[in-house]
Image (cartoon, rainbow, N blue to C red):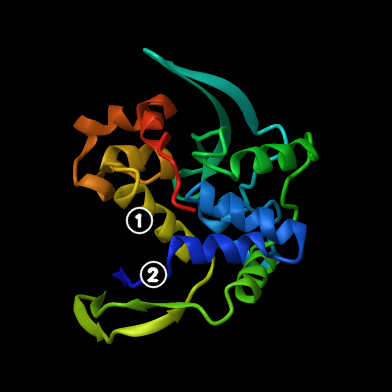
């Protein structure tokens, strides 16, 4: 279990100050999409072939649209993300274009436009992790005590600090979506690609909700950011 994650403001400032443009936008995308690193990077390394596959977007994997609900009318950028642990199943991550809600959306959209049909982040997981190691140097979070089951036997794992890296971005974003934006388990399932069983402990009878589109959660993102 994760605890004591760094502040959102700290992580966002680190990302914004990244010296390399591709590093900045790679981590910006990973955070914004609540994504696994394989959902962002565009190249699979030989050592990863047996266990993971790069599913990162091309420049065409974003469109602009309008969200309308009663008096609300907001521009939105909709990014197509291919969910890593669900066979590359597509999900739509919708972000408000107005910078008072999300200052990174327009930057990400403009960056994607530079690549057209090409991969936006045409490098491997190892390179993305190296960028994260450099940018988040000195930051860590605590792993709580838990038990690892192996062949029916439980092995206790003691609480310990862990360096803040790419996967921690997914947990930090999910925490922010819950605590600041008021996301529910269904919202997170749609946005981040988790199954409903893992989010709220329900089975196939509720699975239809996982197919709801970005309109289901979008209004909750229309909240002025703290940073």
Q: Residues within 10 Å of mark 2 (few under 14, many from 20)?
A: some
Q: Residue at (66%, 72%) from the top-left corner?
A: 130
Left of 26 or right of it: where is 36?
left
Q: Residue at (78%, 35%) from the top-left corner?
A: 117
In the rendered view, would you say 213 is above or below 163? Answer: above
User: In terms of depth relative to the viewer, which is nearer, 34 or 226?
Assistant: 226
- Secondary structure type for disc 2: loop
Q: Position of residue 21 (x, y in %)?
A: 76, 57
Q: Position of residue 150 (x, y in %)?
A: 27, 77
Q: Which mark is residue 175?
A: 1
Q: Position of residue 184 (x, y in %)?
A: 26, 41
- Secondary structure type for disc 1: helix
Q: Which mark is residue 120?
A: none
Left of 43 or right of it: where is 38?
left
In the rendered view, would you say 8 is above or below 192? Answer: below
Q: Looking at the figure, which quarter contains the N terminus? A: bottom left
Q: Residue at (49%, 61%) from the top-left corner?
A: 9
Q: Which mark is residue 5?
A: 2
Q: Is residue 63 visible?
A: yes
């Amino acid at each position: 279990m994760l605890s004591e994650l760094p502040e959102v403001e700290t992580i966002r400032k680190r990302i914004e100050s990244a010296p390399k443009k591709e590093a900045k936008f790679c981590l910006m995308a990973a955070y914004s999409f609540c994504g696994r690193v394989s959902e962002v990077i565009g190249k699979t390394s030989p050592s990863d072939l047996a266990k993971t596959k790069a599913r990162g977007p091309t420049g065409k994997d974003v469109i602009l649209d309008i969200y309308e609900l009663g008096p609300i009318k907001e521009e939105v950028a909709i990014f197509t993300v291919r969910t890593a642990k669900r066979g590359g199943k597509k999900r739509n991550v919708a972000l408000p274009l107005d910078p008072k809600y999300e200052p990174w959306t327009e930057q990400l959209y403009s960056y994607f436009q530079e690549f057209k049909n090409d991969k936006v982040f045409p490098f491997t997981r190892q390179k993305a992790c190296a960028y994260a190691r450099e940018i988040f140097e000195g930051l860590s979070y605590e792993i709580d005590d838990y038990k690892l089951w192996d062949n029916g036997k439980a092995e206790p794992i003691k609480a310990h600090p862990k360096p803040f890296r790419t996967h921690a971005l997914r947990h930090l974003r999910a925490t922010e979506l819950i605590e600041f934006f008021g996301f529910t388990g269904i919202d997170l399932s749609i946005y981040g690609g988790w199954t409903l069983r893992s989010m709220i402990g329900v089975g196939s009878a509720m699975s239809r909700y996982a197919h709801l589109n970005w309109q289901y959660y979008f209004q909750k993102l229309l909240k002025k950011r703290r940073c």
